[in-house]
Amino acid sequence: MPQLNGNTCEIDELPDGVTVTIKVTTNSRHTQRITVTRNDEVLCVFAGSGERNAMTGQSTIVANSRAKLQVKFEYQTDINAEWLKSRQLKSGGPYTIGSYNLLVIVAENGDDSDYNDSVLELSWSTPL
């Protein structure tokens, strides 16, 4: 399971060498930002806003079992405002269906408690 701490998450259970697809959506009028790093190297940054699972981005990385992924969730209440920490994170998974694996982390800003302001999905396939 990912380790949740405030507005950050550490993920260390990804199998070495697999290609991981990272997909991010938002369900908030406030701009959301998710930063994915490994060993202090920024791998990808997603930012966007919108309702009904508005797509903010997709990327792929190759997992490294010797290095944890760190994911930081933030939001902005106005275009020129400072970035604020998402109030709380929740996670589900990883779920395995055959060779398909899915891990989901959701963030809540604190304005409506629906836990979908930012949604991060990591998916990968493993040999059977």
Image: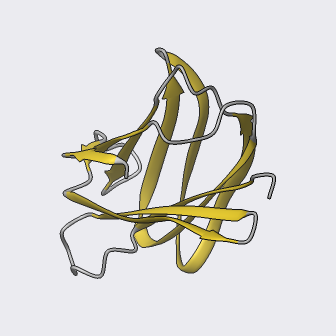
Residue shown at 65% from the left, 62% from the top: 101
Q: In screen coordinates, is 17 left or right of 7?
A: right
Residue at 53 percent of width and 20 percent of height: 66
Residue 116 falls in which quadrant of the image? Answer: bottom left
Q: What is the x, y in percent for residue 51?
A: 51, 80
User: Can you say which quadrant of the picture contains the C terminus?
Assistant: bottom right
Which residue sits furthest front?
Answer: 128
Above or below 101: residue 67: above
Rendered residue at 51%/21% (across/down): 67
In terms of image quadrants, where is residue 108? bottom left
Please give the count of numbered marks on the rendered protein: 0
Q: Is residue 73 left or right of residue 82?
A: right
Quarter of the image where one finds residue 78: bottom left
Q: Residue at 53%, 73% (x, y): give it.
A: 50
From the top left corner, tell me how far across and down residue 18 is, in percent: 75, 39
Instruction: Report whether 22 appears left or right of 116.
Output: right
From the top left corner, tell me how far across and down residue 71 is, in percent: 43, 39
The image shows residue 127 at horizontal and vertical percentages of 81, 52
The single residue placed furthest to the top in the displayed view is: 40
